[in-house]
Amino acid sequence: MNVFKETKKYITGVKTEAKKVSWPNKKTAIKDSFIVIGISLAAAAFLGGIDYALNEIIRNIVV
């Protein structure tokens, strides 16, 4: 088995499949990116709040 032949075959397959993908337009990509960023920030704030609350509870119990 030739590693270089297999690698070339793999890359050719990836290029062929990438041409079949339905890529979004710029406006859709930007809108979806902002949605992902917004959800990520909301999740980070939520988890940060829970972490802070649990730290305060534990600090009051231990001290």
Image (tube, rainbow, N blue to C red):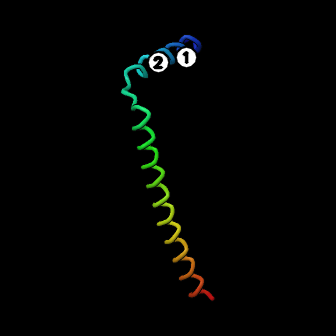
Vertical placement of residue 31 versus 22, above or below? below
Q: Which residue is mark 1?
A: 7
Instruction: Please state which amino acid type lies under the numbered disc 2.
Output: Lys
Mark nearer the viewer, 1 or 2: 2
- Mark 1, residues whose alpha carbon is within 10 Å: few (<14), some, or many (≥20)? few
Residue 1 is situated, as x and y percent measured from the top left of the image, at 54, 12
Give the number of callouts.
2
- Mark 2, residues whose alpha carbon is within 10 Å: few (<14), some, or many (≥20)? few
Residue 62 is situated, as x and y percent measured from the top left of the image, at 60, 86
Vertical placement of residue 4 versus 20, above or below? above
| Residue lying at 55% horizontally and 10% vertically, measured from the top left | 5
| Residue lying at 53% horizontally and 67% vertically, measured from the top left | 48
Contact between marks 1 and 2 (CB within 8 A): the answer is no
- Residue at the right extreme, as displayed: 63
Residue at disc 2, secondary structure: helix
Instruction: Please state which amino acid type lies under the numbered disc 1.
Output: Thr
Q: Which residue is mark 2?
A: 15
| Residue lying at 41% horizontally and 21% vertically, measured from the top left | 17
| Residue lying at 44% horizontally and 55% vertically, measured from the top left | 39
Horizontal arrangement in the rendering, residue 51 relative to residue 19 (left or right): right
Horizontal arrangement in the rendering, residue 22 relative to residue 36 (left or right): left
**The C terminus sits in image quarter:** bottom right
